[in-house]
Image: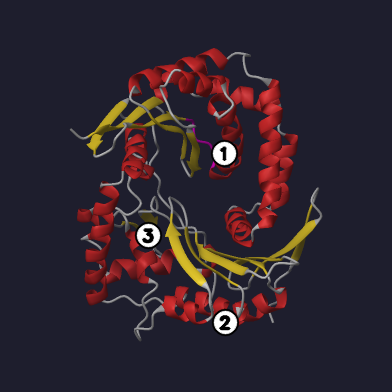
Amino acid sequence: MTNAEIKKINVAHINEEYFEFTHRSGLKVVVCPMKGYATSCAFLGPSYGSINNCFAVPNGEFVTVPEGIAHFLEHKLFESENGQDVFELFAATGANANAFTSFEKTRYHFSGTQEFHRNLEILLNFVTSPYFSDENVKKEQGIITQEIKMYEDSPSWQVFFNALRAMYIKHPVRIDTAGEVESISKITKDLLYICYNSYYSSSNMTLAATGEVKLEEVLSVVDELYDGKEPLPKPLENFIPKEPLHVNEQIIRKSLPVSIPLVDIGFKEESLTESENFLNRLKYDILLNMLFGETSELFKKCYDDGIVTKPFELQTVAGNGFVSLIIESETKNPETLYQLVIDEVKKRQNGNLSQDDFQRFKKVALAEQIRLWEDPVDLASKLSDLARLDFNLNDILELVINLKFEDVEKLLDNGLKEERSVLSVIDCLL
């Protein structure tokens, strides 16, 4: 049995608790038994995403790998040397399984209502048993090429990444998560093993299990499958180029077969540490809703004037070296909407935010943290994110509870600058 110190986290204000520990292998583990739930689930994966294309190998030398390799690696881990289909193994227990790669993380996950022990074994087994060959790499290159071409035809995907390309000059957040056809053609099995051995080290991995789970059961499986694995001798060193604060280009357009132009209006914000960016994301979310939410004056005006026909989609994109605010909408008047957004920001700066709006959206943010306990999958995903940066749910709850109106005012007055804004448009293909 593991000799790790197990910490019980008593979640203030909502009378809940969960457990966390660092296994002797270095694996961070979070376990939250949830009474009354039949579903059990787990999220497992490394702090490794599409922006991690330059890093130091054990001899200290930095290597640069092709764009899209983290996503490629995620796909390949589902393939085993004996040809066993991992999805079939999960299906045999009635579980659903999947995976995803984002800018800074890769996650493999399952959920089901029976045989949690077996499902957790399957999850840990295939993620810790890589098998790459020249043949299966070539086959995957064809599959992901088709996926990339599908993304090229997706208006929502293109308007979003075009906004990031307009904002960012050097930072790899501007690169499509899946890479490009040319970049994935350069991926080899040797490069995959280099990335796997660097980023999938147990000390760079997080496991979160929630729902109908038992702490002892998780301990048993982790002890069995991570026995003999050692943490990295020193933290993995990534190279992220220093990004200037100005934008790359202010307007970017592309034509696709859409009935109404699709628009992303973005603001490039100053980046702090990765942890600070993570915490500030919640503050920016509140600010975005105050300015552009469904009850905002700007949305009401745009809707009444026929400029938009549905609420704005609002998003804060933040991580290691990047913070961006995105307002997305469909409109026949992209330039008009862009100017209205810029004018609204200027109008609300320097003491013109509503305290009532702040209090309302602060309550919404608090309710969202509490609602995590209604869904084991949402909770496991959140706990995995928090553990990656050494936070717990109390940190987030305290952040929301102690958030002051002046904190959000300061974000607005110091950010959302017109000169750091961009307009990304998907025009109707004629």
Foreground label between 2 and 3: 2
Compared with 143, 344 (above or below) is above
- In screen coordinates, is 164 left or right of 297? left
| Tag shown at residue 70 | 3
Neighbours of disc 2 within 10 Å: few (<14), some (14-19), many (20+): few
Q: Residue at x 50, y 70 (%)?
A: 96
Alpha carbon separation for disc pair 3 and 1: 24 Å
Instruction: From the image, tell me which residue sits under label 1.
Output: 281
- In screen coordinates, is 217 left or right of 227? right
The image position of residue 39, as x and y in percent, is 63, 69
Identify which amino acid the numbered label 2 is placed on.
Arg
The image position of residue 212, as x and y in percent, is 68, 71
Which image quarter: residue 40? bottom right
Q: Give, as a single range, the part of the protein colored magenta.
A: 269-273
Identify which amino acid the numbered label 1 is placed on.
Arg
Please tell me whether residue 379 belongs to the stretch shown in magenta.
Answer: no
- For residue 270, say whether it is visible: yes
| Tag shown at residue 118 | 2
| Disc 2, SS | helix
Q: Main secondary structure of the magenta part?
A: loop
Query: Quarter holding the N terminus?
Result: bottom right
Which image quarter: residue 223? bottom right
Identify which amino acid the numbered label 3 is placed on.
Ala
Upstream in sequence: badge 3 or badge 1 = 3
Count of numbered badges drawn on the protein: 3
| Disc 3, SS | helix
| Tag shown at residue 422 | none
Q: Residue at x 28, y 57 (%)?
A: 147
